[in-house]
Amino acid sequence: MQVLPLFISGAEIGFIMFILVMVFGADKIPEIARGLGQGMKAIRNASNDIKSEIQKSAEKQGIDTDFTKDIKGEIDKVKEDIEEISGSIKRHR
């Protein structure tokens, strides 16, 4: 079973498309979709610019921005601890 974003089923998407065609007409839908795509691209570019500016500012201040390695290391430690504790509890089949 595939879950679609916003939990919308195929029938609901079809109904929404039907309403869009009725309201805007078939010739306007590509223009609307193009405008939405350009808007989403602008938002993505702006968020990437903001992210890079924050990272540059943090690096200038001497703040370590590569925290993902630390998090992965901590996760590995927790996994090892859980395996060590649960090793004696696990059933052997």
Image (cartoon, rainbow, N blue to C red):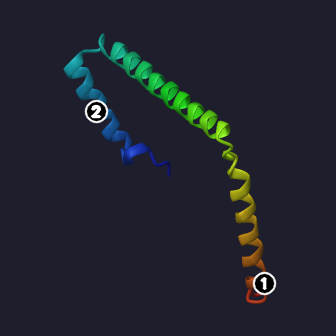
* Viewer-proximal residue among 59 and 85: 59
Q: Residue furthest top?
A: 27
Instruction: Say which amino acid is labelled 1.
Output: Gly
Mark 2 touches mark 1? (CB < 8 Å): no
Q: Dot 2, crowdedness within 10 Å: few (<14), some or many (≥20)?
A: few
In the displayed structure image, the side of residue 18 where residue 4 appears, left or right: right
Which residue: 62% across, 37% down? 55
Kindly identify which residue carries mark 1: 87
Q: Residue at x 29, y 12 (%)?
A: 28
From the viewer's perspective, tell me whether residue 86 is left or right of residue 29: right
Separation (CA) of disc 2 from disc 1: 53 Å
Q: Position of residue 84 (x, y in %)?
A: 79, 81
Q: Taking 87 as reference, is 3 above or below it?
A: above
Q: Residue at x 49, y 26 (%)?
A: 46
Q: Quadrant of residue 65?
A: top right
| Residue 16 percent across, percent down from the top left | 28, 33
Quadrant of residue 21 within the rendered picture: top left
In terms of secondary structure, where does tag 2 sit?
helix
Residue 38 percent across, percent down from the top left: 43, 18
- Residue assigned mark 2: 16
Q: Residue at x 71, y 71 (%)?
A: 78
Q: Nearer the viewer, residue 32 or 2?
A: 32
